[in-house]
Amino acid sequence: MRITVNFSSLFRTLAGVDQVELEVAGGVTADRLLSLLAQKYPDLPLERDKTFFLLNGQIAKGDQMIREGDQIRLFQLSAGG
Amino acid sequence: MNGYCGKMLFVDLSTGRHEVQPLEEDLAGQFIGGYGIGAKVLFERMEPGSDPLGPDNIMGFTTGPLTGTGALLSGRYTLVCKSPVTGGWNDANSGGYFGPELKKAGFDAIFIQGASKTPVYLWIHDGEVEIKDAGAIWGKDVIETEEILKSALGEKSLRAAVIGPAGEKLSLMAAVINDGHRAAGRGGCGAVMGAKKLKAVVVRGTQEVPVADPEKLKAVNQEIVDTIKNGPAARIAAAFSTFGTTMMTGASALSGDSPVKNWGGVGIVDYSEEAATRFEGAAMDPRYRVKKYSCAHCPIGCGAIYEVNDGKWPVGETGRPEYETSAAFGCLMLNEDLEALIKCNHICNIYGLDTISAGATVAWAIECYENGILSKADTGGIDLGWGNAEAIVQTTQEMADQSTEFGKTLALGSAGAAQKLGKGAEYLITVKGIELPMHDPRLGPGFTRTYAMDPTPARHVKGGLGLQHMQISDPSKYDPEGKGQADLEATAAQEIINTAGLCLFKNFTGVQNIARKLIPPVTGWHFDAEEERNAGLRIFHMRHAFNLREGMKPGDFPLPKRSVGEPPQTEGPLKGVTVDYKGFNQNFFKAIGWEETTGRPSRSSLEQLGGMEYVIDTLGL
Ligand code: SF4
């Protein structure tokens, strides 16, 4: 299936694009999608523990299944002050 | 003494006298600098119950051992005083160049008591101290004041910490501004200065601060630069250097990090992604940035200077709004208008207002207006609806210049305004009268303990687990069990960052244990993890003791219900979240050894820390 991943803030800056389209197998989980993206964008700091994965506006669990048409948004919140 | 001038200046504005006292190495070793030494001095010299806006309040301009030594990321100075907002301990720090210049002028700290009958400013140059007439600058804005001072004193390189008209008129949100747009904002420092009729503290000097091992300091500085460039956080550090705190404004609004609609809304529901992104440096810079801005001795340089020459509010040269400002004057009031944001930021800078409290106060007023608590009769005809850019700018202007009744009321801050009006208290998002900053504890639950139990409530720049928590989505962060010790360690470490004169944004560099790396070559001290921890806890307790002596107890600092998810949100990423803030407090109290209802530390824990004899006696521990 074809899915669209949106990047916000720092990820958008580092990736240089707002969103990316990916062809993935059905049944892909949030964690699996993150590792696919990490391969495609080695410059993005996509550490699992520091990456917010919003799936249809909710924080996704790692084993949560992605379905066609889902809204996916990734970002990081590096805190300083 | 290495790292210090070894001198503190005490000025009495009531008598016009001043005296210089040595800063003893023992005191420096125990309390480091900044608000550490500041808390010790104020605890010993100020009577409890002193009126924060009266002559007995003592205001300190303090630096740390690293300030002015060339140690990187160390250009900050800290104001200390009793807060007219909370009635308790207050400190606020600022970057720029004022701190290093104060040390070049010969002093580690200046403490000012008394009050002048007529407006004055302090002129301190190479150890000389003069109290001068401020008649020509009273009433002027921050930028005009600096310009007049430079020409009157014939000194282009001077540095000044000044109040604008907001401080003169005792606005409880008044900040002290240096270098045009760097603010020691929180807790009403500007009002304390205004009450003393002190318009500015102006410094200039040529003295060198002695450094124990300049070669070693150079090597540590190099290591910091290398880590920023090539370390594990290099990409983040580079983005932060370019866009500063606006690097993540969009993600903050979407994630729930930024409070939305006076803490009652949800970013992805009530605010648009497009608007949130519009307030990021990546979107704003191409249009407005004319140059980068860096504080003294900082290899990051996270600031920027904008120029706005057209549109609805052509303010000319101005500082890029920081994240806190962009959230407070953005999603907190559902403002999507970038020009309005820049204008409000500019108003706050030149009139001298804390942008967090100012934005939060306007957001509170909007919610009151939307719910019929305030009417056009109260606002003077302003149609103060959510996101109404013109109304937001006009309200901010009136709040800054106090030209209307409505402006005068809001200048008291949201809690002060609610009290004066006798309505609107149900929409206050304050702790002990001060507005919460722009990081939501429902995303970073550790902030609950810091916002309530730091001696300066409602601060995101104080130690604790909040900053760690907001960066992770793992739900185990919401469980307070067993987190007290980590909270305590993070708190102690942050006390050293703040009092050494370091910038909190060292967090973006990837450099670990930066204080422990820089303090030894500068001071010549042995300063290991244990010494760092003990000094941090000593300082934390000294600030806490100030509040205890004022009769304050933990129950006086309740968090606003919305900020802890009571009731929880029904939509968005933080749906269903209620923070066990009592659990975070209890675990922290257990770790630090404070009695839960009174907040009193044990005598033995203070004896163990050492240097707290006066506190033990005074509090009768
Ligand atoms: S990181 Fe930014 S705020 Fe901190 S010292 Fe550098 S320029 Fe100033």
Image (tube, rainbow, N blue to C red):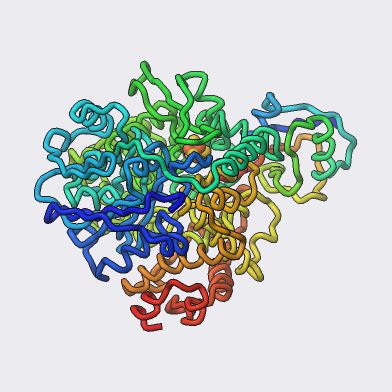
Q: Quadrant of residue B58?
A: bottom left
Q: Which quadrant holds residue B230?
A: top right
Q: Is residue B40 left or right of residue B576?
A: left
Q: Which one is in front, B74 or B21?
A: B21
Q: Position of residue B289 (x, y in %)?
A: 47, 21
Q: Residue at x 16, y 37 (%)?
A: B138
Is B387 or B23 nearer to us in this picture?
B23
- The relative height of residue B397 versus residue B216 in the rendered view (above or below) is above
Horizontal side of A72 relative to B353 (left or right) equals: right
**Residue B254 seen in render:** no
- Furthest-left residue in view? B117
* Residue at image coords 23%, 43%: B128
Q: Position of residue B286 (x, y in %)?
A: 52, 19
Give B465 or B615, whichever is nearer the viewer.
B615
In the image, residue B437 above or below residue B161: below
The quadrant the C terminus of chain B occupies is: bottom left
- Judged left or right of residue B425, residue B463 is right
Q: How many marks?
A: 0
Is residue A42 visible to us here? yes
User: Residue B380 placed where, x, y %?
Assistant: 21, 40
Residue lying farthest right?
A25
Determine the residue located farthest toward the top in the rendered image. B310
Q: Percent from the top left, x then y, of residue A38?
A: 80, 36
Seen in the image, is B384 located left or right of residue B197?
Answer: right
Q: Nearer the viewer, residue B381 or B173?
A: B173
Q: Residue at x 36, y 17 (%)?
A: B309
